[in-house]
Image (cartoon, helix red, strand yellow):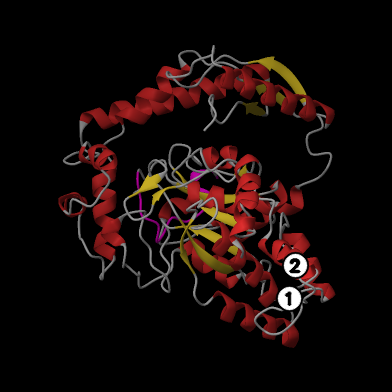
Amino acid sequence: MSARFRPWIRSILTSMRLIANPLLVLAGLCATAGMTCRNAQGQPPSEFDVFEKGIDDIHTALRSGRVTCHGIVEQYLRRIEAYNHQGPALNAVQTVNGRAIAEADRLDAIATGSGPAGPLHCIPVLVKDQFATNDMKTTFGSAVFKDFVPQNDAAVVAKLRAAGAIIIGKATMGEFASGYAGSVSGPIRNAFDPRRHASGSSGGTGAGIAANFATVGIGEDTGGSIRGPAAAGGLVGLRPTLPLVSRYGMMPSKPSYDTAGPIARTAKDAALVMDVIAGYDARDPVTAYAVGHIPGSFAANLTRSGLKGVRIGVIRQPLSTTTDPTSQDYKNIRTVIEQALREIEALGGHIVGDIVIPDAANRVARANAGNVFESETAINAYLAQQVNAPVRTLRDILLTGKVLPSRAKEMMEVVGHSVDEPAYGKIQRLTESTRQLVLGIMADRQLDVLVYASGDHSP
């Protein structure tokens, strides 16, 4: 592309969402020059544009013949090429699947012969690089694992593939599931404004979906790592109840908190992904708790009248000890939340009133800061299962000297701790007492749900 167009495109990307689709830009340039642009197969560009499209949109276009799976994947790959390391350099994709086009061609052949391969037929998915893939590098955001290719797929990855999805790439992540930067890749940038971060640690998934690098994404949430990136990217992020989704093949952080879930543009897309990834897995025994409690379909339960009669409590108090209620961005967020509440009421939800959780911010801070007991044992156990891993223990990781200094400092704090320590029991009691406190308030007020801001400050 001519250098004279780059400042114009960059100014749009910096001030707004990534609205400049490279295919549309290319078509405009070709029209100006009096040419007809063609793709790698010598065909004119598809009339179907993947920008801001959901699962149903793509399936409708495939059924109508407006586009092929090859064409869908090709468009997303062009967006990644244009915006991931160039232009705004979002750094949302760690590794692109070199077999994505071949996989799309295979799915096109299947569809021609026998119909769709599954409920997520030809849906490009961006998976956080915390989940093992047996055909792509899995780095966990760290230079220590920059060349590591696991021997087995994570459970979530295997289920997505079985449903016909295409893993278009691995999303950049905060190193070992914390923050929004890693030693293997650097910082992840926000798709709305690359001068801001995308939250973490599933920031690559969030920024990638916001930038239309894939239709949907998979993140992991220990202490906000799905919810934060979704909020920062204007997306729907679902942290599922922990037993719903298998963590097999996912590098752990704190197993009593870790869970995996979708990041998508709509609640419908998130529900369709949950329909695929939820379920019992003997390799992650905690999923046994969910047996008998998973609906036949999450997506089928979505209705326009779903909020009618639902009793909603609103938490307006800060949930972080570092919140500054006098700041302008805090006030801006409250404005957005209040508008969302008005929309909820318009859809039939009943706002019961303000709910105050006694000592909430301190409870959250104590639980997060104090839980240093699970990580080392869990990480060591995970690495022991990876026969070709470059290191065998958490201590080995730290001794390489490759981890970002800020992240290495955090990780050193967990070394030598275990769940057998009496202090771990205090954390568990704090967690349970908070759970009982919240459920008691909900029971007393007859609440179905609590609403609160994902964060009190903007990225």
Q: Which residue is mark 2?
A: 27
Q: Estimate the x, y position of residue 392 in percent, counting from the top left.
A: 20, 60
Q: Estimate the x, y position of residue 165 in percent, counting from the top left.
A: 61, 68
Left or right of residue 72: residue 316 = left
| Magenta span includes 94 | no
**Main SS category, magenta section:** loop
Q: Is residue 411 depicted above or below 45 in this figure?
A: above
Badge 1 crowding class, 10 Å Cα cut-off, few under 14, some 14 to 19, many 20 or more, is some
Q: Estimate the x, y position of residue 113 in percent, counting from the top left.
A: 73, 88
Q: Nearer the viewer, residue 410 or 275?
A: 410
Nearer-N-terminus badge (1/2): 2
Q: Which residues are magenta?
A: 240-253
Q: Residue at x 54, y 39 (%)?
A: 227
Q: Which residue is mark 1?
A: 37
Q: Is residue 295 visible?
A: no
Q: Nearer the viewer, residue 27 or 286?
A: 27
Three-letter amino acid code of the residue under disc 1: Cys
| Magenta span includes 251 | yes
Q: Which mark is residue 206?
A: none
Three-letter amino acid code of the residue under disc 2: Ala
Left or right of residue 141: residue 326 = right
Left or right of residue 12: residue 405 = left
Q: Estimate the x, y position of residue 321 in percent, counting from the top left.
A: 42, 18
- Whether pointer 1 and pointer 2 mark residues with C-beta atoms closer than 8 Å, the reply is yes
